[in-house]
Image (cartoon, helix red, strand yellow):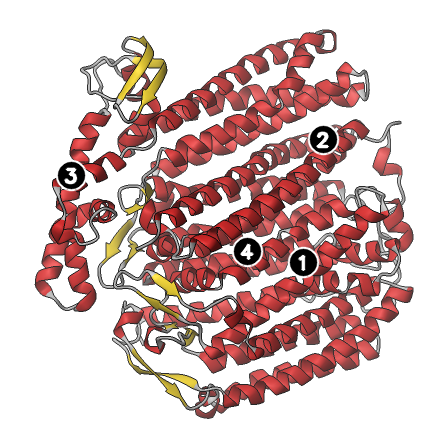
Amino acid sequence: MNTFAIAQVIWWVLLGVLLMGLAVMVGMDMGVGAILRYVGRTDTERRVALNIIGPHWDGNQVWFILGGGAIFAAFPLIYATAFSGFYVVMLLLLWTMIMRPIGFEYRSRIDNPAWRNVWDWALVVSGAVPMIVFGAAFGNLFHGVPFHFDWDMTSYYTGSFLSLLNPFAVMAGVLSLSLSAMMGSLTVMSGAEGAPYQRARALAQIAGLVAIALFAIGGFWVHALPGYQLLSVPGLGVPQTPLQQTVGVGGSWLQNFGTHPLLWLAPLLGFTGMLGAVFAARAGRSHLGWWLGAGAWIGVIGSAGAALFPFMLPSSSDPSMSLTVWNSSSSELTLLWMIGFAAVFVPLILWYTSWAFWVMRGKVTEDAVVHDEHAY
Amino acid sequence: MINGTVVDLSRIQFAATALYHFLFVPLTLGLSFLLAAMETVYVTTGKPIYKQMAMFWSRLFMINFALGVATGLTMEFQFGTNWSFYSSFVGDIFGAPLAIEGLMAFFMESTFVGLMVFGWQRLSKGQHLAVTWLVALGSNLSALWILVANGFMQNPKGAAFDPITMRMHLTSFQQLIFSPDAQSKFVHTSIAGYVTGAVFVAGVSAFYMLRKRHMDLAKRSFRIAVLFGVLATIGVVTLGDALGFVDAKAQPTKLAAMEGLWRSEPAPMPFNVIAIPEQSEQRNIDAVQVPAVLSLLVTHSLTGTVPAIDTLEKRAEQRIENGIPAVEALKALSHDPQDASAMAQFDAHKADLGYGFLVQRYAPHLSEVTPSEIQKAAKDSIPPVAAVFWSFRAMVGMGLLMLAFFVLATLYSLRDRIQKKTWILKVAVWMIPVPFLADEAGWLVAELGRQPWTVYGVLPTWMSASTHSVGYMAFSLIGFVALYSVFIAVEMYLMVRAIRLGPPEHGGGDAERPLSRPTLAPRPVPAAPYGTKLEG
């Protein structure tokens, strides 16, 4: 492998890390939003739940923005093709996502039950829908997406909105939602007391068990879906377009696991994390459970990435035009510069994010929420 | 080929969502600095009134910030959803500053904004001050990287087209970030944000002084704002001049449109103060001119000239003719990347590839292109003159108006007579919308003036959109308009309400209130919440 190919693989891994960061950090906030009306029955209980993530959701959301920016910078063809192809779904994601900052910031500024009810529902929808879309987008990769390119690399998406909601994708969407509900519940447990704490504790276990079941079903299901193989490419680490390769469809997506048995560690981590988180929630160990849940996300996303590699966006209508690590990345120079920036700033981000959580540690009490002018 | 209506709808959607986003960003840029300044005075002098000021203005800051963040999400994804050809064509260069913005700036701004709001009781004075400064620094670095990306669209530096991958690739990262367009735009735009913040704080403070409410807070806020404002307005005018100088070289069509220059003239060129440009007749129906001033303004000399639209169209025609073989060679290369003669033809003509694309709109089969199609495309190379001309004058006029206001307000404020000058306080309240309108006008000059290109001289707008149906684009546009209309109504309502409520009376305010969370409560769970393993 030459430097370009190595840089491409490094960026593939980095993109995976950013998506894991997104799933863990945004997922927990989305989870809190999605379960808001269940864990919090009274206005004050809901405010407690919101204020647990209050100081952090803004920073966490940047994982989502950075995810978009990183795909754009490192794999522009994926960014262009996937975001335009998944059009209606992307709009659904955006329209619900942009309700969130406003929901957080504006909800508690007016003391009126109808006003707060509307924003509570906005937070529920803007928590649940994006996580379903996030999972469903991943699910669609295993089916392939109907798109092709013109001679000048203009992309055409030929499917409909509904074709993106196939059963496998919906299952992946629900898996993603249940994992984030589990993480949201563990987060509420860590900051709340009394009734919301108990409700969150019960919900964390249920959501975790649903996630385990769906992840297992997904594993068997993927086994039955035809996988993609690169039959010919201009070369690895060679500048190229998807018009210059041939791809075969058949066999299984689990082929990579057969060639490299170590990859089984990823699904193992997924299952262990989920199961561990369920037990931790049961035992009231919310922080331990949260870390195990983060491990579960890493395992689940890692499994999907490992199964798909080197494919990133398979085309179902013209498989030879599938986008891979090798044909959809930026140039070597861009990738190397971006590796440099990521190497400096990702550790820095993790460090000051940790500090922010450390500063704001502790329980959020009902009394404090009611009396603080700045509280959500 | 992409449907023209789809391109138009995509442009309307981009302009609408970007202009909307740009209502909130400048205030964030300016207000974050003012918050940091107020808190710095608090920490250095220990006077609690400055803490009250920082806390009060930060409440208004957050109402604005929420919508800035929400509408920024749309921008980050819109390139991919609506402009997919653009995204794959220049993602190699354009995506990098966007990603760096997230890594370096937006993460910092957003993480620390949470601590700025919730951390008053948890952080020491010095720590909280540092956090506030990091928010201001983050929002400004954010602007830097976004404008580096935008600078590339205005004047593509540090990149080349690769006929094998059919997209542009980076050739020099240094050239990309140190592009003169990017640098002068960054300073001009971020300072415009400071002006916006200053006018906002001055206007709201004047509102209180007129009603004799919160006098101490209002007077002090007003003074900080106008001092900051007078410096910022001088900066914005100076940098605007520098930007015009850069544009004169890099984007002659934008400059010609800004000045309504239809016919070339010898130096020193006269300046059209007011004119009614008519694009179809290529002339100004009426104009008020000042002799020699244009040469002075844009070339900083009496002997300099800038090309007018007649000359620029002639140049475009030549470049289109030269660009046609480049596009044809590219087609051959897409079928056979090894084709040496096609590669040689491409290399000979590649400088004008973009102009070849420009005429493809009228002649999809370039071998059959007619002279009239070339002329039509050459006419396209000129942006909409009247719109750019008037946006530019609106921006400059409002800039000078704000400068005059700030100079007067500073004089009275420093002599401590401002509370008696009710007329200038009333003007201050009426000034609040002005910087926002000036910011929007500035955006229009920059981006309408860039037309017909998404990347100047390289990629025409008509090619850049996604291949959606008209129905999809209408659907998304309607959705955004509906959602954004509700948001702005809610935002304005909350902002006005928070201003009317004002800061808590009787001194102490928030500082006296119970703690938001127990400072260090005994906890039943292990001391480290998520993410704190790195600590200690």
Q: Which residue is mark 4?
A: A65
Q: Is residue A349 left or right of residue A285?
A: left
Return the mark for residue B372.
Answer: 3
Chain to which the residue tagged by mark 3 belongs:
B
Dot 1 and dot 4 within a common chain: yes
Residues marked 4 and 3 touching at CB (< 8 Å): no
Residue A346, image x and y in percent? 54, 60
Residue B146, image x and y in percent? 46, 44
Q: Residues within 10 Å of mark 2 (few under 14, many from 20)?
A: few
Residues marked 4 and 2 touching at CB (< 8 Å): no
Residues marked 1 and 2 touching at CB (< 8 Å): no
Specify the amino acid type for callout 4. Answer: Ile
Specify the amino acid type for callout 3. Answer: Ser
Return the mark for residue B44.
Answer: 2
Q: CA distance from mark 1 to mark 2?
A: 43 Å
Q: Earlier in the sequence, mark 1 or mark 4?
A: 4
Residue A311, image x and y in percent? 41, 76
Classify mark 2: helix, strand or loop. Answer: helix
Q: Is the residue B32 above or below the residue A334 in the image?
A: above
Q: Is residue B170 left or right of residue B482?
A: left
Dot 4 and dot 2 within a common chain: no
Q: Residue drawn 39% across and 34% down?
A: B448
Q: Is the residue B343 above or below the residue B130 in the image?
A: below
Chain to which the residue tagged by mark 1 belongs:
A
Q: Residues within 10 Å of mark 4 (few under 14, many from 20)?
A: many
Specify the amino acid type for callout 1. Answer: Ser
